[in-house]
Image (cartoon, rainbow, N blue to C red):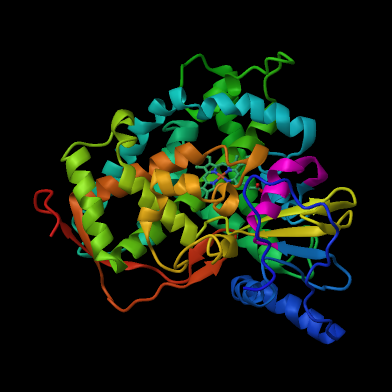
């Protein structure tokens, strides 16, 4: 890479005004072609540009000011140091159509209030409520796949994370409708990622088949969720799930609780933000472990030592240190949230570069996580680099799978817990191997960084816990 900003983690940002590297000025035709190609295959484009122009550059999109950053100092400035100069970018508006004003989208004082209300549901002391649910759902998944000799692990992990997020949000209330909910969410996700990449965004009332499909799916999930909320509001039963925590949370400052509409928006947000991200990370973890038998062996040794044949509990999860390193390294190479977008609220200087009000900022998490100045052998799978000592020596913002600053993912501990439970329990019971040992899984950047094809694995019961 060229043009990297090299600075110490703790130094104040450079205030001198510098010239941002700009992609070559192109004809209108080439600009449009570039934008079109970028929308179709953004990962390849951004990786190539980061190699050629460095970790800060201007897309030179003419009618749109777009700056791309994969430099940790700049990322720290946007998400943490000068966060008030930036807001969620206009790209999130597409999500607003389906998520409403939930935590992922809302801004300012309203967001702050909602975050304050929702935060306790994700505190460590609330987590033990969810461990049992996660273990039970994983056990159900194990029972379901036990008789198979090969499977698409991505599909199983998708169903598993859906089951977990559904039960943690709504208890068992949704069990009967779970497949319809899955179909509705898939329709919504597909619609959102296609719409986000479309240059022309047809209004929703336009009778296009995709608009009709999307509106039908949204109507279905809304009816279901409003129905559950209403039933809960009228009932007297005690429920131990996220919905009930959110319903009963009272904002300490205002003494208010959430309206039904806001509960719906927060539930749908948690559903969408928490399901595909986790399933995607787990699928990549399986893939990387299949490709690295030495790391698998090390992981199995830990599982054997810490858990033996027992199911994980809240108290044993923190002892699964290598499991955590495997998951962290997986999300370095394949960050489910591969890009974070912001817009500039007022003319300012970012890491020494002038940025104008309304400019769009793309924080290129994928390139950041493979930045050669911060990662030795960046394309290799080396979980050991997440050893506590090495972590402390690294730039704090060279690794941000869950974002950073005040908008840090609220479900980060929930996700890590879920992934640890699912990974260790599946490996306790089964030995997996690639059906096609030469399979190379390519990333497909949609709403999350999903694998472009299914990961098909052979599966057989593990005899004892000795890994061989
Ligand atoms: C591996 C799994 C996950 C990854 C990689 C991930 C990643 C992220 C990232 C990068 C952000 C910040 C977005 C930004 O700054 O624009 C975020 C926000 C958020 N995530 Fe996650 N997430 C994961 C799992 C979850 C889970 C399990 C839940 C809930 C059950 C969740 C709920 C949310 C919410 C509500 C926000 C918005 C928080 C706010 O702005 O206050 N996520 N997530």
Quarter for ligand 1?
Answer: top right
Quadrant location, the C terminus: bottom left
Highlighted magenta segment, given as a residue range: 69-86
Q: Position of residue 279 (x, y in %)?
A: 44, 53
Vertical relation: 356 (above or below) 140:
below
Q: Name the main secondary structure of what is drawn in magenta.
A: helix
Quadrant location, the N terminus: bottom right
- Front-lying residue, 373 or 144: 373
**Image check: 236 left or right of 407?**
left
- Front-lying residue, 166 or 319: 319
Q: Position of residue 291 (x, y in %)?
A: 31, 68
Q: Quadrant of residue 314?
A: top left
Q: Is residue 247 magenta?
A: no
- Front-lying residue, 263 or 275: 275
Q: Residue at x 42, y 57 (%)?
A: 330
Q: Position of residue 71 (x, y in %)?
A: 65, 59
Vertical relation: 450 (above or below) 272:
below
**Image check: 344 left or right of 270?**
right
Q: Residue at x 44, y 22 (%)?
A: 125
Q: Residue furthest left?
A: 464
Vertical relation: 409 (above or below) 39:
above
Q: Residue at x 67, y 19 (%)?
A: 257
Vertical relation: 250 (above or below) 364:
above
**Image check: 220 left or right of 82?**
left
Confirm whether residue 81 shows in the render: yes
Number of marks in picture:
0
Q: Residue at x 64, y 46 (%)?
A: 219
Confirm whether residue 446 shows in the render: no
Q: Is residue 74 magenta?
A: yes
Q: Position of residue 74 (x, y in %)?
A: 70, 54
């Amino acid at each position: 890479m060229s043009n990297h900003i090299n600075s110490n983690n703790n130094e104040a940002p450079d205030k001198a005004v510098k010239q941002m590297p700009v992609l070559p000025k192109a004809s209108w035709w080439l600009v449009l072609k570039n934008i079109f190609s970028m929308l179709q295959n953004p990962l390849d484009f951004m990786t190539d540009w980061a190699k050629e122009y460095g970790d800060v550059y201007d897309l030179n999109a003419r009618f749109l000011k777009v700056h791309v950053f994969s430099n940790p100092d700049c990322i720290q400035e946007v998400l943490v140091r000068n966060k008030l100069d930036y807001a969620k970018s206009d790209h999130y508006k597409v999500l607003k159509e389906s998520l409403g004003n939930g935590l992922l989208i809302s801004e300012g004082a309203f967001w702050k209030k909602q975050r304050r209300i929702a935060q306790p549901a994700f505190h460590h002391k609330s987590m033990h409520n969810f461990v049992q649910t996660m273990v039970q759902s994983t056990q159900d998944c194990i029972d379901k796949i036990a008789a198979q000799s090969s499977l698409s692990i991505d599909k199983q992990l998708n169903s598993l994370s859906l089951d977990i997020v559904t039960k943690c949000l709504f208890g068992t209330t949704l069990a009967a409708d779970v497949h319809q909910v899955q179909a509705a969410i898939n329709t919504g996700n597909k619609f959102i990622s296609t719409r986000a990449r479309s240059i022309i965004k047809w209004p929703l009332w336009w009778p296009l088949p995709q608009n009709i499909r999307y509106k039908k799916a949204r109507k279905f999930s809304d009816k279901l969720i409003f129905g559950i909320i209403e039933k809960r509001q009228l009932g007297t039963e005690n429920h131990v799930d996220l919905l009930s925590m959110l319903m009963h949370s009272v904002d300490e400052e205002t003494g208010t609780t959430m309206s039904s509409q806001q509960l719906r928006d927060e539930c749908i947000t948690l559903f969408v933000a928490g399901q595909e991200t986790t399933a995607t990370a787990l699928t990549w973890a399986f893939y990387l472990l299949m490709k690295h038998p030495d790391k698998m062996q090390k992981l199995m040794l830990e599982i054997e030592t810490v858990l033996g044949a027992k199911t994980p509990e809240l108290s044993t999860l923190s002892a699964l240190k290598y499991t955590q390193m495997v998951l962290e390294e997986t999300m370095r190479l394949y960050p489910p949230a591969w890009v974070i977008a912001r817009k500039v609220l007022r003319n300012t200087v970012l890491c020494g570069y002038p940025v104008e009000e309304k400019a769009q900022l793309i924080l290129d998490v994928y390139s950041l996580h493979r930045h050669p100045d911060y990662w030795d052998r960046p394309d290799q799978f080396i979980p050991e680099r997440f050893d506590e000592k090495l972590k402390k020596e690294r730039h704090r913002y060279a690794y941000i799978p869950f974002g950073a600053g005040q908008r840090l993912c609220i479900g980060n501990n929930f996700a890590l817990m879920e992934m640890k439970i699912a990974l260790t329990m599946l490996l306790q019971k089964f030995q997996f191997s690639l059906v096609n040992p030469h399979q190379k899984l390519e990333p497909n950047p949609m709403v999350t960084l999903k694998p472009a094809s299914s990961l098909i694995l052979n599966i057989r019961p593990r005899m004892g816990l000795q890994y061989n």
